[in-house]
Amino acid sequence: MRLTEPDLVRWGRTIGHGVQPPVVLALEGPLGAGKSVLARAIGEGVGVDVPMPSPTFNLLLRYDLPSGVSVVHLDLYRISEPEEVWELGWAELGTRPEIVLIEWPEQAGELMPDDYWHVRLTVTRGNRKLRDIEVQRFGTPPPLPGFPMTLGRNQ
């Protein structure tokens, strides 16, 4: 799928508005690909009404909403070993009504949960305004609104 940044924002808001927590979304891609843009749009869609900076230096930012849903935004870029995620409360993530957004999920390696959506964003060659989006389902996460549900399931 190929999206402009405004399309990416609309899709993110659709996800935030319609996804059933708990859900984990792994957002992978190079710097500048739109991971934080998508994460903020998902947050806006679920009702986060404060700025959502990238958690690069904090590693984890949590937004608790009046609805009882929380948005948990992680940036694992700075961790050096996958085991470091345990210090972030990794075992409990996605066990409550949460939308968990993980940037740089590859840093967690084999410690990723059984059920999640993997969203890979890349800048389209020759056109920095377009993003190529690949979505893959691992396990049985809840449906991802606004995306064709004919995807194959990976275990």
Image (spheres, rainbow, N blue to C red):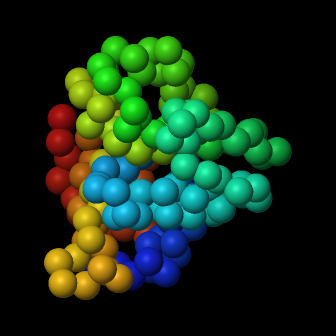
Q: Is residue 98 above or below residue 47?
A: above
Nearer to the camera, 139 or 133: 133
Q: Is residue 123 above or below residue 140?
A: below
Farthest residue to the right: give it. Answer: 66
**Residue 62 can be seen in this image:** yes
Residue occupying image coordinates x 44% and y 73%: 8
Nearer to the camera, 118 or 20: 118
The quarter of the picture where the N terminus appears is bottom left
Q: In this view, does 102 lie above or below 80?
A: below
Q: Is residue 30 above or below residue 125?
A: above
Question: Which x, y percent locates residue 55?
Answer: 55, 42
Question: Which x, y percent locates residue 66?
Answer: 82, 45
Question: Which x, y percent locates residue 115?
Answer: 34, 35
**Residue 1 can be seen in this image:** no
Residue occupying image coordinates x 48% and y 57%: 36
Nearer to the camera, 89 or 79: 79
Residue occupying image coordinates x 18% and y 84%: 126
> Across the whole image, how many numbered discs are drawn on residues?
0
Nearer to the camera, 147 or 61: 61
Q: In this view, does 143 lie to the left or right of 71?
A: left
Residue occupying image coordinates x 17% and y 78%: 125
Figure quadrant of residue 3 = bottom left
